[in-house]
Structures are given as structure tokens and as C-alpha cells.
Image (cartoon, grey):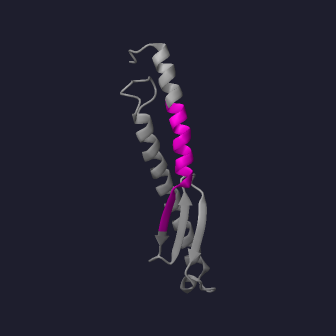
Amino acid sequence: MFDGSMDDLLKKAQEVSQNMQAKQEELAKKRIDVSVGGEMIKMTFNGKQEAISIHIDPEVVDPKDIETLEDLVLSAVNEGIRLSQKVVQDELGKQLGGLGGMKIPGFNL
């Protein structure tokens, strides 16, 4: 249970909020690169989990086999989202971990 004063808790919460906002802005600038299919599909995501670029090797474009291309694109998108979520979670977890060991009910890190 939290043993500090309410003022200390409020100050720390305000500090964490400001730090979180700065961290989110920093994360938005991060770039996460993924590739699938032996680098036939390459995508870049940002820390806001948005796809910002895609490169498709012309070799993978076969009008008779669109399914493979679709599967590769989906795979790249899902991997990019997964990795960008991990980056965000890791970075924000570090930030929230700075609460100095305070135990706040219902908030576990």
C-alpha cells in the first residue's frame, strides 16, 4: 500500500504525466523496420503503431498468385504492429517503473 502523503502522490503523478507525454512524443519519432519473406516485403512503422512505408520486391508480384502477396503483406503488418507495441510497452514501462516502488492498488508493473 502507498505510505506517502497525498501531496507526494499528486506531485509524482503530475511528474509521471509530463514525462509520459514527452515519452509518447519521442516514441512517435521511433522507427521499427520489419521484413518478411526473405525481405521480399519490407515495412517501417513508427512508435504510434502506424505503417509509414512499404516496399514490395517486384519478384513477389505474381498476378497468378495474389494470395501469397496478400499473406506476406498481412504478415509484415502484424509483425510491425507487434514490434511497435513491444517498443511502446517497454519504453512506457520504464517510465512508469520510475514511480519509486510505490504500490498503487490496481496498477501493476
Q: Farthest right residue?
A: 63
In the image: residue 101, left or right of residue 70 = left
| Image x and y of residue 101, in percent | 36, 27
- Residue placed at 49% from the left, 15% from the top? 7
> Magenta span covers which residues?
16-34
Residue 105 appears in which quarter of the rendering?
A: top left
Relative to 51, say whether 22 is above or below: above
- Residue placed at 49% from the left, 60% from the top? 32
Q: Farthest left residue?
A: 101
Q: Is residue 19 magenta?
A: yes
| Image x and y of residue 57, in percent | 55, 81
Residue 66 or residue 23, whichever sits in front: 23
Magenta stretch: helix, strand or loop mostly: helix
Q: Quadrant of the N terminus?
A: top left
In the image: residue 42, left or right of residue 2 = right
Q: Is residue 54 magenta?
A: no
- Residue placed at 51% from the left, 20% from the top? 10
Relative to 47, say whether 69 is above or below: below
| Image x and y of residue 76, in percent | 52, 67
Q: Quadrant of the C terminus?
A: top left
Residue 54 appears in which quarter of the rendering?
A: bottom right
- Residue placed at 52% from the left, 72% from the top? 42
| Image x and y of residue 67, in percent | 58, 76
Residue 71 or residue 52, whichever sits in front: 52
Residue 78 or residue 92, whichever sits in front: 92
